[in-house]
Image (cartoon, helix red, strand yellow):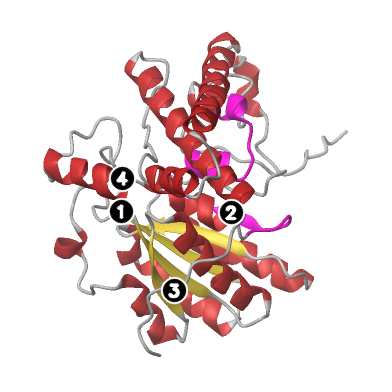
Amino acid sequence: MAARKTTKKPNVSADELKAYYHDMLLIRRFEEKAGQLYGMGLIGGFCHLYIGQEAVVVGLEATAKEGDSRITTYRDHGHMLACGMDPNGVMAELTGREDGYSKGKGGSMHMFSKDKRFYGGHGIVGANVPLGAGLAFADKYKGNDNVTFTYFGDGAANQGQVYETFNMAALWQLPCIFVIENNQYAMGTSQQRSTSSAEIWERGKAFGIPGEAVDGMDVLAVKAAGETAVAHARSGKGPYILEIKTYRYRGHSMSDPAKYRTREEVQKMRDERDPIEAVRTLLLQGEHATEEDLKAIDKKIKDVVNESAEFAKNSPEPALDELWTDIYATEIPQEA
């Protein structure tokens, strides 16, 4: 199995480019607002922002269809917004309010949407990977052509349960797309210091799972690789691995000063590789949009994000008896 690195780009329309720009900018502005609310003490606990990685989930969601599932770890707000979850409900959950997706009980790392087939948000590193295989198993059992996008990071890629899952997914030919969001630093240790193999996706070779490395700062490259992976999984050929090489601009969480890298390194990435600016340039150079058009999109998004913050602030705290709901899948009948 020869090493592969995706280079092809899909043909996309001006409207599709604008949609990618909108969706990535929505994630960026939402996360910036979440960071502000955290600083104000309105978001408690942990808060892991997705700023810089927006092209990953937007590019892959462009290849998904209704019925597909997605599951991820704790840097999850971008995934929620990209699959169509309401910003109001997401922000309300971040602030622990009754109108949040988990009724204020889950917070940043534990919110779900059955309607959008978004199954979390998981705080234990790597623990979502076998769960993603389970979702894919359910679809294979039902005989449909749905796939599951199972996201995890370069840090989680060294967890043993990941490889147990690779083995099982390969044996059972599960329609699971394993997405390694390699942002280079895991919690705070560079990949070069923590991972023996330069190309993490190549570990799938031991299990006969094909895959490729992808430029995660280019939404079109992500979409192209996603189309390959989705076609493979939908056709019954089993799992596929995408190692999407991206970069987060903020620390691991809001409490991380990120002293393990220089400010110059981060600024260079922002200046030269920003995924949103790349699409903005395509839109302007291709004369698909004007500066005024893009400013209007930004204003509309800021209005949506500001509205979500106000919605969250005005949503009530969950009642104490809410602690006893949503414990079981179905109500247990009371004995007479």
Instruction: Tell me the crowding category of disc 3: few under 14, some 14 to 19, or many 20 or more residues within 10 angstroms, Cα based.
Output: few
Residue 211 in view (yes/no):
yes
Left or right of residue 305: residue 65: right
Q: Could you say where residue 334 lies in the image, as x and y percent from the top left?
A: 82, 35
What residue did someone put label 2 on? Answer: 61
- Quick one: 230 or 256, which is closer to the camera? 230
Lower position in the chain sequence, tag 1 or tag 2 = 2
Instruction: Tell me the crowding category of disc 1: few under 14, some 14 to 19, or many 20 or more residues within 10 angstroms, Cα based.
Output: many
Q: Nearer the viewer, mark 2 or mark 3?
A: 2
Q: CA distance from mark 3 to mark 1?
A: 23 Å
The region drawn magenta spans 64-90
What residue did someone put label 1 on? Answer: 183
Residues at circles 2 and 3 in contact by the CB criterion of under 8 Å: no
Look at the image and tell me in which quarter the C terminus lies: top right
Q: Could you say where residue 315 lies in the image, as x and y percent from the top left?
A: 60, 13
Left or right of residue 309: residue 84: right
Lower position in the chain sequence, tag 4 or tag 1 = 1
Q: CA distance from mark 4 to mark 1?
A: 6 Å
Residues at circles 2 and 4 in contact by the CB criterion of under 8 Å: no
Q: Which mark is residue 164?
A: 3
